[in-house]
Amino acid sequence: MESNGTSTGTILLAMLGGAVVGAGAALLYAPQSGRRTRQRLQDLGEDATQCGRDFFKSAEECVANATAEAKEVMYNAAAEAKEVMHKGHGCAEELRQKAEAALSAR
């Protein structure tokens, strides 16, 4: 998820922060009443809050999916390791029996 040392989340947060600052500056310099400007700033703050909530919910879902995938990979790796161990024990037992047979035949 990293590209050139900068994560996607960092870029999105920087863009969101820039948008909030730019919109706030535009509102402050706009020729309108104080009450209307305060209302627009409040609306902007609510929008930014909702955007932040949406971002963190999405991040939470992404982490949950990655965790589920990691658990599945670990489970599959453990199952494969058990199978390899079982085969290894079978091969070792077969070699032991052949070695005993060879020694007995002497």
Image (spheres, rainbow, N blue to C red):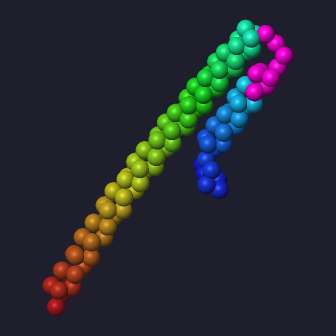
Q: Tell me the residue at 56%/31% (across/down).
A: 56
Q: Nearer the viewer, residue 103 or 63?
A: 63
Q: Nearer the viewer, residue 67 or 41?
A: 41
Q: Is residue 73 left or right of residue 30?
A: left
Where residue 54 appears, x then y in whole percent? 60, 26
Is 105 drawn above or below residue 88 in the view shown?
Answer: below
Where residue 55 appears, x then y in whole percent? 60, 31
Q: Tell me the residue at 24%/79% (across/down).
A: 98
Where residue 93 appears, x then y in whole percent? 24, 70
Q: Tell me the residue at 18%/80% (across/down).
A: 100
Q: Is residue 32 magenta?
A: yes
Is 54 drawn above or below residue 65 in the view shown?
Answer: above
Number of disc labels: 0
Q: Tell me the residue at 76%/22% (across/down).
A: 28
Q: Residue furthest right?
A: 31
Quadrant (top left, top right, bottom left, bottom right) of the C terminus? bottom left
Is 9 drawn above or below residue 97 in the view shown?
Answer: above
Q: Nearer the viewer, residue 84 or 73?
A: 73
Is 2 drawn above or below residue 92 in the view shown?
Answer: above
Q: Is residue 62 magenta?
A: no
Q: Which residues are magenta?
A: 25-33
Q: Quadrant of residue 38?
A: top right
Q: Quadrant of residue 20?
A: top right
Residue 62 seen in the current view: yes
Where residue 61 appears, x then y in whole percent? 54, 33
Residue 43 seen in the current view: no
